[in-house]
């Protein structure tokens, strides 16, 4: 992404967002690609480093703040949304980004995630989903598939996995998107749209852990397979995919999705993506098996933000409350403790 050419904005480059810390992820980890794209997108926004804050929890992904030359905070397990919410309320001018993993956000941090989404705090939440606990050396996670053999499930996991985007939709998130670590162009576009959204944006990034869960998404991320196995959704455009765009998604009488071979006679049966339709987003987010994987902005609507409403409430209270602090303490609403 080029340097922002608007002369009124600071001239910053990707290098400005690269810290002096040695990156300590395993060689070949998908996190390297995500880090590179975030740094590139930040530079393209033309916003100075001092206006960014990167907040993380615990896990491989949560080393992120060390590698960003911005404000940052490596917090405790699962609690990054709570810390980030407080930061956004304290300094609403900051662009606050939450970096988390499938274990950090959907296990110990599950409640924090759903509440920050329903409140619609103006944060960008990037959830790296490698379907494994990588930092603690390969235990199954809330997104691991059933039957997954790991150090903590040697006979195969019996847990039913979460679908992260469906969790976000069920929490009334106002922006839900999905991308892949190695899909560089698409990932950058999603990160930019996430930044531009006013409210809590949730981005699931499908990420490979080449040490403990290598090839988790190999069935649709390989160069030979991605065109046939991925549908890149775009608002107002038909849901077409395939090397020749000759396959489409249609709705069955049972209100499920199916793949049809597209011809001139049945083109009108192909669904058109509507990112304001949460039902459609739910169907797209859960496609697996014979259906393609949906990537892009699945859902986006506008709703007042929690931080905006809270700050407006504080301002209103300041304007309308004429009582001073001493008078409030000595007022009628007091308690006697014996």
Image (tube, rainbow, N blue to C red):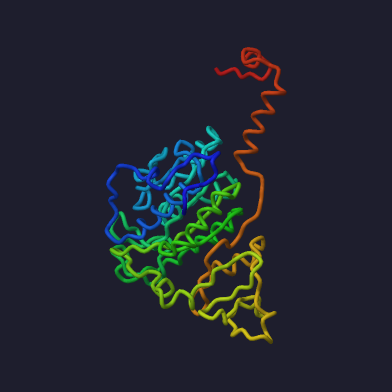
> Which residue is at the front of the view, 47 or 10?
10
Between residue 13 and residue 85, name the one nearer to us: 13
Residue sitting at 41 percent across and 69 percent down?
145
* Placement of the C terminus among the 4 image quadrants: top right
Residue 157 in sight in this render: yes
Residue placed most toward the observer, 35 or 137: 35
Q: Position of residue 154 (x, y in %)?
A: 29, 68
In this rendering, position of residue 259 left or right of residue 63: right
Q: How many marks on residues? A: 0
Vertical placement of 323 versus 116: above or below?
above
Query: In the rendered image, which quarter is residue 275 located in?
Result: bottom right
Q: At which x and y percent is residue 69?
A: 38, 41
Residue 113: % across, % down = 51, 50
- The quarter of the picture where residue 304 lies is top right
* x and y, in percent, of residue 39 in the image: 42, 49
Is 298 left or right of 323, judged from the image as shown?
left
Residue visible at 62% across and 15% down in the picture? 325
Looking at this view, is 122 or 71 the one in front? 71
- Say if 113 sits above or below 88 in the image: below
Seen in the image, is 299 located left or right of residue 178? Answer: right
Q: Is residue 253 visible?
A: no
Location of residue 26 with respect to 14 vertically, above or below? below
């Amino acid at each position: 992404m080029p340097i922002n050419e608007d002369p009124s904005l600071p001239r910053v480059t990707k290098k400005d967002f690269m810290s002096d810390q040695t990156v300590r992820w395993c060689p070949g980890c998908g996190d390297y690609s995500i880090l590179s794209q975030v740094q590139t997108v930040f530079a393209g926004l033309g916003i100075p480093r001092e206006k960014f804050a990167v907040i993380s929890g615990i896990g491989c992904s949560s080393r992120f703040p060390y590698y960003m030359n911005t404000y940052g905070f490596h917090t405790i397990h699962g609690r990054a949304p709570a810390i980030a919410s407080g930061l956004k309320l304290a300094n609403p001018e900051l662009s606050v980004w939450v970096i988390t993993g499938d274990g950090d956000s959907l296990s110990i941090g599950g409640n924090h995630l759903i509440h920050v989404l329903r409140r619609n705090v103006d944060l960008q939440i990037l959830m790296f989903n490698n379907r494994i606990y990588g930092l603690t050396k390969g235990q199954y996670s809330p997104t691991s598939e059933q039957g997954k053999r790991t150090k903590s499930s040697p006979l195969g996991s019996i847990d039913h996995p979460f679908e992260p985007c469906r969790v976000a939709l069920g929490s009334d998130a106002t922006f839900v998107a999905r991308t892949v670590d190695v899909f560089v162009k698409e990932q950058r576009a999603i990160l930019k749209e996430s930044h531009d959204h006013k409210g809590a944006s949730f981005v699931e990034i499908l990420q490979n852990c080449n040490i403990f869960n290598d090839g988790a998404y190999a069935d649709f991320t390989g160069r030979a397979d991605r065109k046939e196995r991925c549908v890149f959704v775009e608002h107002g455009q038909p849901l077409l995919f395939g090397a020749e765009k000759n396959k489409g998604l249609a709705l069955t009488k049972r209100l499920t999705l199916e793949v049809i071979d597209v011809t001139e006679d049945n083109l009108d049966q192909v669904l058109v993506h509507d990112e304001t339709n949460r039902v459609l987003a739910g169907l797209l987010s859960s496609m697996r098996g014979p259906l393609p994987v949906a990537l892009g902005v699945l859902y986006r609507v506008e709703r007042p933000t929690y931080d905006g409403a809270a700050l407006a409430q504080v301002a209103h209270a300041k304007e309308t409350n004429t009582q001073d602090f001493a008078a409030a303490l000595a007022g009628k609403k007091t308690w006697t403790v014996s």
